[in-house]
Amino acid sequence: MAKTNDILNKVELVSSEAVSDALSSTLPKFTKVQLVQSEKYVHRRDALNALLEDNKTYSSTEVDGILKKFDEGGKA
């Protein structure tokens, strides 16, 4: 029974990552400048300037994840 649970856990992990990747690829992407200037992140501008790369685009979901990880004390 333990092997069955291990397999199910791995399937769930792979499935959730695949769904997350699929959703991320269809969401609109924004530059660092656009995100820093947006109203949504008005109180997080300093963090965004420090955490995001200049020549990369990000979805809102990606940015929220980066900020959450940062808030929890992890590196982005």
Image (spheres, rainbow, N blue to C red):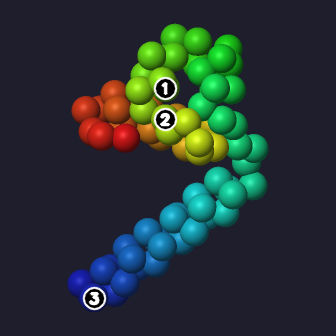
Q: What is the CA distance from the residue labelled 1 to the residue labelled 2? A: 6 Å
Local packing at callout 3 (Cα closer than 10 Å; few below 14, some 14-19, many 20+) is few
Indicate the secondary structure of the residue bearing disc 1.
Answer: helix
Pick out the residue farthest to the top: 43
Indicate the secondary structure of the residue bearing disc 3.
Answer: helix
Pointer 1 and pointer 2: residues touching (CB < 8 Å)? yes
Give the image location of residue 5, x and y in percent.
Answer: 32, 79
Q: Residue at x 70, y 43 (%)?
A: 29
Residue with the mark numbered 1: 48
Q: Earlier in the sequence, mark 3 or mark 1?
A: 3
Local packing at callout 1 (Cα closer than 10 Å; few below 14, some 14-19, many 20+) is some
Q: Give, as a three-letter code, the residue at label 1.
A: Leu
Give the image location of residue 48, x and y in percent.
Answer: 49, 26
Q: Earlier in the sequence, mark 2 or mark 3?
A: 3
Q: Give, as a three-letter code, the residue at label 2.
A: Leu
Give the image location of residue 42, x and y in percent.
Answer: 58, 12
Q: Give, as a three-letter code, the residue at label 3.
A: Lys
Residue 3's mark? Answer: 3
Observer-side mark, 3 or 1, equals: 1
